[in-house]
Amino acid sequence: MRERKKAERDSLVLSEQTFPIIEQITAGMPGGFFIYHADGDKRLIYANRALIRIYGCADLSDFQAYTGYTFPGLVYPEDLEMTERSIQQQLLTGGDMDYVEYRIVRKDGEVRWIEDYGHFVHTERYGDLFYVFVEDATEKQRKSIDDIHTAQLAQERLEALEALEHETTALKLVHEILRSGMWTMEFDRRGRMVSVFWSHEFRAMIGYRDEEDFPNVLSSWSDLLHPEDRDRVLEQYYAAIDDYTGRKLYNVEYRLLTKDRGYRWFRATGKLSRREDGTPITYVGMFVDITERKEKDAELREQRKLLEEALEKAQRASRAKTAFLNNMSHDIRTPMNAIIGFTNLATTHLADRALVRDYLHKISASSSHLLSLINDVLDMSRIESGKVVIEETPCSLPQMLRDLQSIVQSDVETKGLEFCLDDSALVHPYVVCDRLRLNQVLLNVLSNALKFTPAGGRISITASERPEDKADTAVYIFCIRDTGIGMAPEFLEHIFEPFERERTSTVSGIQGTGLGMSITKNLVELMHGQIAVESRKDRGSVFTFTFPFRLSAAPDMQETPEVPAEQRLAGRRFLLAEDNELNQEIAITILEEAGCIVDAASDGAEAVEKVRRSLDNPYDLVLMDIQMPVMDGIAATRAIRALDDPRLARLPIVAMTANAFEEDRQRVLSAGMNGHLGKPIDVDKLFATLQELLNGAEG
C-alpha cells in the first residue's frame, strides 16, 4: 500500500501534463522560475515565460537553442565556477536551499545580474532536482543597495522555501511558497468566461468547506465584497480582463465577509494569459489574508497620530510657558516698579500727608496685585502635584454671593460698571461645600470680567438650582456674564490650558499670569463640577458653572455684637518667635498699636527658653514662625508641649508663616499648634484669630 501511494505521489511530480498548470500559476509571477536536474549535464526540464523574457528570447524554442537548456548555459561563463561552488557549499553546510547572485548574458548581448533562490529536492523517480526562482537584480546592483537589505530579502525567500516539502507536486510547491488561496478562470475565443475555480485553501481562508458550500461561480466571491470596496474592486477586476494589451495586472486590497470571522482584509493579484489577438484565455490569481498587517498599520497610524498630537501639545505648552515667563517678567516688574517708585516718592514728600497717603494706597494696591500673581503660580503648582484638598462645610450661598459682591464693589464703582446679582431662583440656599474654593472659582471669573469689560459695561452673576436624583442633593448653576471685549475662537479652544493668555492682553495693558482659568477649571473638577464658556469677539463672555451640592439646614441666627477685636486685646502679653527683623518690626508694631505687650525671640530655641522662664510673668499666646534657625517652629512647639508645667504646656500657639497652604495648616495643627495665619499678615484676620483663641482658652 505504501509503495502504491508513493508511486501515485511521484507520478504527480513534473509530468508533462502538469506543465500547463504550472504555467498558469507562474504566468503572473514577476520573476523567473525553472526546474533542472542537479546531476549530469544539469539539464532543464521546465522554464516559465518570465525566465524566457529575462533572457530576451522570443519563445521556449528560441530559449532552448540559445541556452542549450542547461543550467551552465544560463550563467555568465566567468561566474559559473563561483556559482556552482557557492551552491555546493551552501548545500553542504546549510541544508537543501541556496541563494546566489551571478551574471547572465541576454540574447541581445546585454549583461545583467540575477538573484537565484534554489530549493533542492531528492526524488526516487526523477533523481535530484532544483526548483529555482530568479529575479533580475541589475538595478539593485547599479544602485548599490546595502548588504543588510539584500540579506533580509534573501532571508525572506529562504524562510518561504523552508515551508516546502520534499517530493511534492510543482503546483503545491508554488502554492505553499505564496501561502495563498488561488483562483483560475477560463475564457472561450470570444472572451466569454466559461468556468471558475476556487481553490480549497481559499475556501478554508474564508470559512467554507467545499464546492457545495461555496460554488465555483464568480458571484460566490463578489457577493462577499464589503459595500465600500465593491465598486472599486470589480472595476479593477474587469479592467484587467478588458485590457487586450496584456500590460495591466490585477492587484488590489479589499475586505471580504468570511463565514465565521466577520470582514477580513485580503490582497488579490492576478494576470491573464492571452491569444495573439489579445482575447483572454486563462485568468490566474491568488488571495493572501493581510488582516494582521492592516491592523498593525492602523495601530501604527493611531500611534503616530497620538505621538503627533502629544508633540503638538508639548510644543504648544512649551510656547505657552515661554510666553508665560515673558509675561511674568513684565507683570511682576510692573507692580514692583510701582512699589519701589512710590516708596521713593513717599520718602521725599513726608511733609505732604495727603500725597504720602495716596502713595501708600498705590503701594498697597500694587503689593496685593503682586501677591495675587505669586499665589496663582503657587496654586497651579499645588493643583498639579495633587496637594489641594477640598474641605466641605455648611455654607449660605446668598451670603457668599453678597460677600463676593462686596469684594468687587470698589472696582465696579471705579470703572463705572453696572453690576447685577440675582439669587432669587435658589430654593435651598444652604449647602455643604468648600466655600473658600467656590469663592475662589467665582472670584477668578469675576476678576477677569472686571479686567476685560470697559467702562459703562455690565456684569451679572445669577444663581439657580435644579433637582438631583438624590433627595439630599441639588445641582447649582452659577452664570457670570459680561459685555467685555470677548475672546477670539482660536484662544477659546485653549482657554483652560496653563500659561495661555489672549494675545491682546498685554497690548491692552491687562496683566495676569495666564493661570487663572486653568486653576479655575481644576478647582471646579475637584469639586465634581463642570465649567463651560461662550464668547464672541467684542460681544462679551458667558461662564457657566454647575456643582452637585448636598443640602444643609439653615443655621441658628443669633446676633452677637462684636465694638473691634483689636480693642479687646489691649494689655495681652504675646511672645513673637520670628527670625526676620523686618517681619518682627511689622508684627510688633501692629500688636503694640492695639495695646498689646510683645516680647520677641529670634529662633525656636530662644522661644522655648523664654516660655520656660515665664511662670512669674506668663504669656497669653505665642506667635510662631515655622522656618527659623537653631530650632524651627514645629520643633519648638513640640518642646513647649513637652514642658513639665501644665500651664506652660497648654499655652496657645499660632503659626504665623509664609507657608500659607492648607497642607501647611494641617501640618502645624498636627504638631500641636492652635491656629495658622499666613503671611503677608491680614490684620483683621490676625486680631480675629487671637481673640477667638484667647476666648477659648479662658472658657
Image (cartoon, helix red, strand yellow):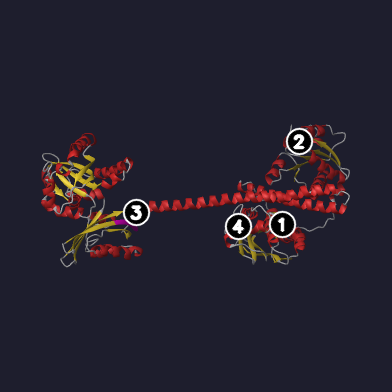
**Which mark is nearer the camera, 2 or 4?**
4
- Residue that mark 1 sits on: 395
Which residue in the protein does label 3 denote? 291
- Is residue 534 on the magenta stretch? no
Q: Amino acid at mark 2?
A: Arg
Considering only order in the chain, which callout, 1 or 4, is on the residue closer to the N terminus?
1
Magenta stretch secondary structure, dominant: strand
- Judge by depth and name the residue closer to the eye, 576 or 240: 240
Residue 508 appears at what percent x and percent y? 68, 59
All told, the count of numbered labels is 4
Q: Nearer the viewer, residue 125 or 435?
A: 125
Instruction: Return the x and y of residue 189 as percentages of the image width and height.
Output: 15, 66
Q: CA distance from mark 2 to mark 1?
A: 34 Å
Q: Amino acid at mark 4?
A: Ile
Give the CA separation, mark 3 to mark 1.
60 Å
The residue indicated by pointer 4 is 495
At 33% across and 56% down in the image, what residue appears? 265
> Circles 2 and 1: CB distance less than 8 Å?
no
Locate residue 272: give its quadrant.
bottom left
Q: Label 1 crowding class (10 Å Cα cut-off): few <14, some 14-19, many 20+?
A: many
Q: CA distance from mark 3 to mark 2?
A: 73 Å
Q: Quadrant of the N terminus?
A: top left
Mark 2 sits on what residue?
Answer: 641
